[in-house]
Image (cartoon, rainbow, N blue to C red):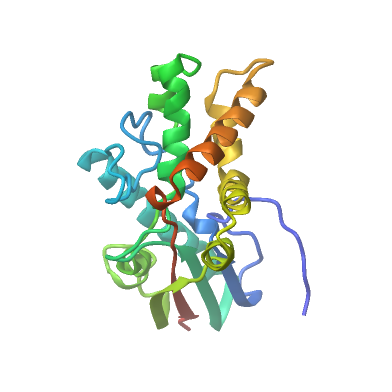
Amino acid sequence: MFSSAVGGSMYDQLRPACSVHLATTFNAIGFLSRRPVDEMPGYIFPNGPSTERNNGYVSPEDRHAFADQAKQDVEAFLIARARELVPGGKLLVQVFGATDKACTSDGIYDLLNDAVLAFVETGEILKETYDRYYQPVYMRHLDELTEPARDPRFESSGLFTIDDARDYEIAVPFVERYKEDGDIERFARDYVNFFRAFTEAVLLHALPSGPGSRDLVDRIYKRAVEILKADPDRYPFRYVAVQMVLTRRG
């Protein structure tokens, strides 16, 4: 068994053909390979706001563009891994996602959207900047994840057999801890630091560059903490995962 680090895109072939027996990915394919639309003026996330908050909108056309891009990305990913895997090799694909009852983006992106809009209202962020800013991430339902592996319309279909496919919910540690101790200070800090880890870089890049941009980002996340502390029930967060286990056909 050998380990290695290979620079490159997960949507391209990274290892020699027929050299891998087991491949895994956890959450990475949730991040799209490109921005499918130039702007999305109603909200900062392609799946749209939660039904609880309903604090924005995404047009049907934009939703379709993101759903299509997400499927193209899975197709490219499967084709690349199929080249690398030996016949009979296994591929485990897991990523945050959605069901009819919950979506992992609910709560966290409602909160970030509200925090960003607070600075749009003060004029520190231009409306044009807000319109162009969004997180290039998509929450798939299970059928959207598996479709490129089973639908003959995709080049990647027929390369694998699907051994298992399922969706499930994962308990969120900082949410469970808050239910037990009611410590709103720690809950708000942990909640915001959690989503800051994977949203800050895109947010910073979306803002006009300058000496005050990083300070503005800091204040946006600080504002998110304040909003959450004032009304935590408006931003419930549940973590849904979707996964499939595949075998490379011979």
In the image, residue 88 sits, relative to residue 156, either above or below, namely: below
* Nearer the observer, 30 or 233: 233
Residue 177 drawn at (x, y percent): 58, 66
The furthest residue to the left: 60
Is residue 48 in view from this perspective? Answer: yes
* Nearer the observer, 5 or 236: 236
Q: In this view, does 199 lie to the left or right of 167?
A: right
Which image quadrant for residue 208? top right
* Nearer the observer, 96 or 55: 55
Residue 154 drawn at (x, y percent): 32, 62
Residue 243 drawn at (x, y percent): 45, 72
| Number of numbered discs on residues | 0
Q: In which quarter of the image is the N terminus?
A: bottom right
The furthest residue to the front: 182
Is residue 135 in view from this perspective? Answer: no
Q: Residue at x 61, y 49 (%)?
A: 185
Which image quadrant for residue 109? top left
In the image, residue 203 sits, relative to residue 146, either above or below, namely: above
Residue 103 drawn at (x, y percent): 37, 59
Q: Residue at x 77, y 65 (%)?
A: 4
Q: Is residue 148 left or right of residue 175?
A: left
* Nearer the observer, 15 or 208: 208
Q: Residue at x 33, y 48 (%)?
A: 47
